[in-house]
Amino acid sequence: MKNASDMLLLVRYMMKLYERYLEDVQVKYQLSYMEITIIGFLYNNPEKDMAADIAEIRMLPKGNVSAGVETLVQKEILARRQDLQDRRKIHLYLLEKAIPIVKEIEKINKNFRQQIFKNLSKDDLKAYERMNDFILENLKEVLERK
């Protein structure tokens, strides 16, 4: 990458493509991108099951996450459970109605990954993943300082 614009463009293209991949699921299940993000996050991170976790880790506005959670609860895709030790904490969990959605998201994630990494060798992919881990740690370190 020659400069910051190239890096930002790469990230933006990846996000745009991923959003496009999810459009059919959004239409089929009448879900917003935020709602799909919440479902996918809870499925992939069962130990991070609070709205605050989703907002923090995915760097999303808390209000948007809360609104998405509320809609998913109303649609009976998601449920809330109060923490037994700390009544202020509310845990989220997916209901059975989420299963077909999750399966489609998994399929999309697999196709997305295949598309963006096609023509890369296994060694290239391992190198990318290793470099990506380093870059992610560098980014976290800088953001935590500020």
Image (spheres, helix red, strand yellow):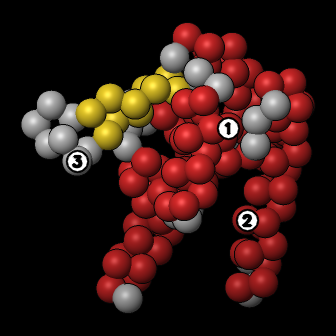
Above/below status of 77 relative to 41: above
Nearer to us in this view, 70 or 93:
70
Residue 50 lies, in percent from the top left, at 37, 43
Discs 3/1, front? 3
Write the residue at 63% across / 38% down. 71
Residue 83 lies, in percent from the top left, at 21, 35
Write the residue at 84% across / 56% down. 16
Name the residue tied to disc 1: 36
User: Mark 3 is on which residue type?
Assistant: Arg
User: Mark 1 is on which residue type?
Assistant: Ile
Horizontal side of residue 92 vs 68, given as left or right: left
Q: Which of disc 1 and disc 3 is earlier in sequence?
A: 1
Q: CA distance from mark 2 to mark 3?
A: 36 Å
Q: Quadrant of the C terminus?
A: bottom left
Q: CA distance from mark 3 to mark 1?
A: 25 Å
- Callout 2–callout 3 Cβ contact below 8 Å: no
Discs 2/3, front? 3
Above/below status of 103 relative to 65: above
Write the residue at 81% across / 31% down. 30
Residue 109: quadrant of the picture: top right
Name the residue tied to disc 2: 11
The residue tagged with tag 3: helix, strand or loop?
loop
Residue 74: quadrant of the picture: top right
Horizontal side of residue 120 vs 142, given as left or right: right
Q: Residues within 10 Å of mark 2 (few under 14, many from 20)?
A: few
Above/below status of 3 relative to 61: below
- Callout 3–callout 1 Cβ contact below 8 Å: no
Residue 1 lies, in percent from the top left, at 74, 77
Q: CA distance from mark 2 to mark 1?
A: 19 Å
Name the residue tied to disc 3: 88
User: Mark 2 is on which residue type?
Assistant: Val
